[in-house]
């Protein structure tokens, strides 16, 4: 039992109440503590949850930022990849990226083209590597980094040379990681380099050949240099010096002779003659001793009168030539044998009228008359057009001739200055005079000229009428200007000199353009105008197949000028041909009247065929006379040129004799110099 049982009942009750009170108090205290603990735990949990929510929000925001940055990075990466892709595609060289296993990862279009990669092959897809690429990967030199290597590849156009440059793109030792290959086509570069090397070698060979050719062609030049040095060395030794002068005279004679032989076939070359003269003698005591010989000058042999006559005849020949070419073309337009003239058309037209007179109501015969009339009009039109086109072509030739004249006068002025400079310096102007004469011959063939000796070797050249072309070293250009007719006139110093040009091809061209063609064109227009007018007049006097008054068979022409080009048929219905004189269908009186025009003097007092025949005769006569004059002029020019050649041309036999003569003179002078030198040595030895 407990101690409680031993207490009195009242005490036990009192103690019982106290114990329960304590227990309740204790229970309340424990409950309060538990509640406080729970409240504290709940607050802590709430705070933890708030912190967790804040952390979640923070992590969510960081994740969003990371996602945003990742998206931007991906976009930037994609943009960069696209940019790099465009760069690779636009590069003028090929690019390959090869991994450490030797597999191609990236290739651009230029690399595909250079390595002949098929279009359907893609790197890294496991397909078969193209043979050319596989060969490149195998044959590329090991460890050839940062050093361009050459690799040859066959192609449809031949062997191509490919340049390869490799570099590492990973942080590994060379040759162990990924590499980038830069490939470029060096075929053209190699070819150009080979061409440059070939050109350099050719140039070097040409220089050597030039030196050798100079020595072979002009060995006398070296000897001339040697004798000049010898003359300077003996300047204080009169006896020896004079014999050196003899050597120089013989040597320069040899040089002139060899130059003549070398130019035996050169057009326009005038042979050179060395003029020797005796040097002044010396008097010793009562005796006079000669001092030898020296070369006075080298002159070019030419006859200025013959040169002038050649130029004059060349002017005449040029004029005939300038006229004859176009005149022969005109003649071809009236060549009845070849069917290009008008006689066939005129005859055929009147023959059709003759057929009409026998059967005036036949429509087929009437149609034949219209066809013949149309053919006649077409013949007139075509001939007129041909003459106009020829005149335009000759007009163009005038402009071209003036341009050639200006080119030649510029060249003559330059050579003229060289001639004067050579004469002033006391040198032989012969080679320059030869050039000038050749240019003057060409100029004379183009235009008539006059030559005036201006002194000091210079010449003044003018046209035959006095317009200046060359004065000393200055040339005066001719010019062309379009006149009211659309043709080119020739001007000098602002003055129109077209009518004053009387020689050379230019004069012949102007004669054809301004005289011959207009005259023939006028005759052709006169024939067309008068013939069509007479036919129209008679045709209107008759009646057509409908019984009506006849009209114009040809369209009326306003005047003579341009009639040949404008002639055309006025009707197309054969019933409208007025063959009848009284209006009946079977009457042929007006057809006979039209036919009778063939033998009437309706063209300036001549029949149509007589007028046309005289025109053709004039054309043929002009061509024939020009041909005769040209042949006669050619003979005269040949004779003058033969006379000129007798003075200026090189005679091989004569030059061969001169060669031996100057050779012997040189050798003799050299022997004398040797003897004198030996005597001087002996004399000096005796004195010593």
Image (cartoon, rainbow, N blue to C red):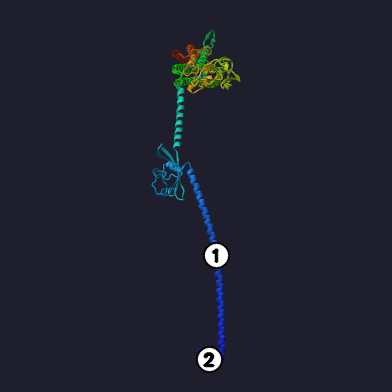
In the rendered structure, are the residues bearing label 2 and label 1 in contact, judged by CB atoms less than 8 Å apart?
no
Tell me the tag on residue 53. 1
**Going 48% across and 45% down the picture, which residue do you hit?**
88
Callout 2: SS: helix
Measured in 3D between alpha carbons, the distance from the residue under mark 2 to the one under mark 1, in whole angstroms, is 64 Å
**Going 53% across and 91% down the picture, which residue do you hit?**
6
Nearer-N-terminus badge (2/1): 2
Q: Residues within 10 Å of mark 1 (few under 14, many from 20)?
A: few
User: Which residue does the numbered mark 2 point to in the structure image?
Assistant: 6
Q: Position of residue 287 (x, y in %)?
A: 53, 8
Q: Nearer the viewer, residue 221 or 48?
A: 48
Q: Residues within 10 Å of mark 2 (few under 14, many from 20)?
A: few
Q: Nearer the viewer, residue 592 or 112?
A: 592
Q: Is residue 396 above or below residue 27?
A: above
Q: Is residue 638 visible?
A: no
**Going 54% across and 67% down the picture, which residue do you hit?**
49
Q: Residue furthest right?
A: 494
Quadrant hosting residue 469: top right
């Amino acid at each position: 039992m407990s101690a409680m049982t031993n207490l009195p009942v009242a005490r036990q009750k009192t103690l019982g109440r106290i114990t329960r009170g304590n227990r309740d108090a204790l229970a309340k205290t424990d409950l309060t503590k538990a509640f406080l603990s729970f409240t504290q735990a709940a607050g802590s949990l709430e705070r933890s949850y708030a912190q967790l929510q804040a952390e979640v929000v923070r992590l969510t925001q960081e994740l969003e930022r990371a996602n945003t940055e990742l998206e931007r990075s991906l976009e930037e990466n994609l943009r960069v990849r696209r940019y790099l892709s465009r760069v690779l595609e636009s590069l003028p060289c090929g690019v390959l990226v090869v991994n450490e296993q030797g597999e191609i990862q990236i290739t651009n279009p230029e690399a595909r083209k250079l390595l002949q990669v098929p279009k359907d092959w893609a790197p890294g897809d496991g397909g078969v590597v193209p043979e050319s690429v596989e060969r490149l990967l195998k044959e590329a030199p090991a460890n050839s980094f940062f050093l361009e290597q050459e690799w040859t590849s066959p192609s449809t156009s031949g062997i191509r040379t490919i340049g390869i440059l490799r570099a590492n793109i990973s942080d590994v030792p060379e040759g162990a990681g990924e590499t980038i290959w830069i490939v470029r086509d060096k075929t053209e570069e190699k070819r150009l380099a080979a061409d440059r090397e070939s050109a350099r070698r050719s140039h070097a060979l040409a220089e050597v050949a030039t030196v050798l050719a100079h020595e072979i062609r002009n060995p006398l030049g070296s000897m001339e240099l040697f004798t000049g040095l010898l003359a300077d060395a003996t300047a204080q030794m009169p006896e020896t010096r004079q014999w050196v002068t003899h050597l120089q005279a013989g040597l320069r004679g040899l040089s002139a002779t060899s130059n003549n032989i070398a130019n035996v076939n050169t057009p326009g070359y005038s042979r050179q003659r060395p003029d020797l003269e005796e040097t002044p003698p010396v008097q010793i005591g009562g005796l006079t001793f000669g001092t030898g010989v020296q070369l006075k000058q080298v002159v070019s042999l030419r006859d200025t009168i013959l040169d002038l006559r050649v130029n004059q005849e060349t002017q005449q020949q040029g004029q005939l030539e300038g006229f004859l070419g176009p005149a022969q073309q005109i003649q071809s337009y009236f060549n009845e044998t070849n069917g290009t003239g008008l006689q066939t058309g005129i005859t055929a037209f009147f023959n059709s009228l003759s057929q009409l007179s026998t059967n005036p109501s036949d429509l087929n015969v009437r149609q034949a008359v219209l066809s013949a009339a149309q053919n006649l009009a077409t013949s007139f039109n075509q001939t007129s057009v041909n003459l106009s086109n020829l005149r335009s072509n000759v007009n163009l030739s005038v402009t071209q001739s003036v341009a050639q004249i200006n080119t030649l006068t510029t060249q003559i002025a330059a050579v003229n200055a060289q001639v004067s400079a050579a004469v002033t310096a006391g040198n032989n102007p012969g080679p320059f005079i030869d050039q000038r004469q050749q240019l003057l011959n060409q100029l004379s063939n183009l235009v008539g000229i006059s030559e005036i000796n201006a002194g000091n070797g210079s010449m003044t050249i003018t046209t035959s009428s006095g317009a200046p072309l060359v004065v000393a070293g200055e040339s005066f250009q001719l010019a062309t200007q379009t006149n009211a007719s659309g043709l080119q006139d020739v001007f000098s110093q602002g003055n129109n000199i077209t009518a004053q040009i009387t020689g050379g091809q230019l004069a012949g061209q102007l004669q054809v353009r301004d005289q011959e063609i207009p005259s023939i064109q006028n005759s052709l227009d006169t024939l067309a105008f008068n013939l069509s007018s007479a036919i129209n007049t008679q045709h209107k006097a008759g009646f057509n197949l409908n019984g009506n008054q006849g009209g114009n068979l040809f369209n009326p022409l306003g005047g003579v000028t341009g009639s040949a080009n404008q002639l055309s048929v006025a009707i197309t219905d054969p019933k409208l041909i007025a063959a009848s004189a009284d209006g009946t269908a079977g009457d042929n009186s007006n057809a006979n009247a039209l036919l009778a025009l063939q033998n009437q003097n309706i063209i300036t007092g001549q029949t149509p065929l007589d007028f046309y025949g005289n025109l053709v005769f004039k054309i043929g006569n002009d061509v024939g006379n020009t041909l005769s004059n040209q042949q006669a002029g050619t003979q005269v020019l040949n004779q003058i040129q033969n006379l000129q050649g007798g003075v200026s041309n090189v005679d091989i036999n004569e030059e061969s004799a001169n060669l031996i003569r100057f050779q012997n003179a040189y050798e003799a002078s050299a022997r004398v110099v040797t003897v004198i030198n030996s005597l001087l040595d002996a004399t000096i030895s005796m004195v010593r």
